[in-house]
Amino acid sequence: MRESYDTYHIFNLIGQYAELEPVLNAISGWLESHISDALVTIMLYSEHDQTLKLISGKQHFSNQYCKAVNNLKIGPQRGACGTAAFLRKLVISQDLMEDPNWAAYRALVKAEQLSSCWSMPIINARNILYGTFGTYYRTPKKPTKHNIRLLEQAASLVALAIELDDERQQKIAINEKYSSFYNYHPDVILELDLQGYVLNTEMDP
């Protein structure tokens, strides 16, 4: 099994605060190695815009398809991923040409020769929506219980990776915020809380 498909490697990347996109690509690769013929995508959710942005899996599809599904508004009948994000539950589309969720996208999926899609929302323990997994197939396919467990496991890995990436970004912002202050005030000692707020200041004797 290739390294990028190894859960040990994925946890290593997450634990080392690696950039988010390589972690997501590794999780996609792991899922593809466990579900035969799956073409995996990960889309991240913008609460402000109520949209999904395609982050991982672009290599499986044409530029036209990627542009069409990028920044996808969530809602009913928004393909599998837009619907899964809206309903916050697994959506299984066994026949994309017949499924009403795909009515607006039939020309696209026909051009890509796609037959089926399953989409799992990525939701953390506090019920915050982070995005969706999409697994596409060129033949009709229905998930087994084992397939669904794999999707759930992959979604949990992505939620963990996103939370730790948020923490990493927060630390970077704190360092940048106070680095210039220390350059001009090297004798000042700041006591910060975990969010980077100043609790106390004193002069270095």
Image (cartoon, rainbow, N blue to C red):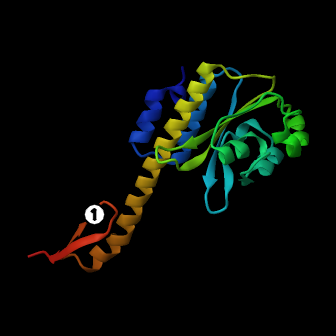
Label tally = 1
Q: Which quarter shows the C terminus? A: bottom left
- Give the residue type at disc 1: Asp
Q: Is residue 50 left or right of residue 178?
A: right
Q: Secondary structure at mark 1?
A: loop
Whether residue 188 is visible here, answered yes or no, is no
The x, y position of residue 103, in whole percent, is 88, 42
Extreme-left residue of the structure: 205
Q: Is residue 103 left or right of residue 153?
A: right
In terms of depth relative to the viewer, which is nearer, 205 or 90?
90
The x, y position of residue 36, in whole percent, is 68, 20
The x, y position of residue 116, in whole percent, is 78, 29
Which image quarter: residue 110? top right
Whether residue 74 is visible here, answered yes or no, is yes
Q: Which quarter shows the N terminus? A: top right
Which image quarter: residue 28? top right
In the depicted structure, whether residue 197 falls above or below residue 20: below
Residue placed under numbered mark 1 in the picture:
193
Q: Residues within 10 Å of mark 1 (few under 14, many from 20)?
A: few
In terms of depth relative to the viewer, which is nearer, 112 or 76?
76
Q: What residue appears at the point 84 percent right and 33 percent down from the top-left corner?
A: 96
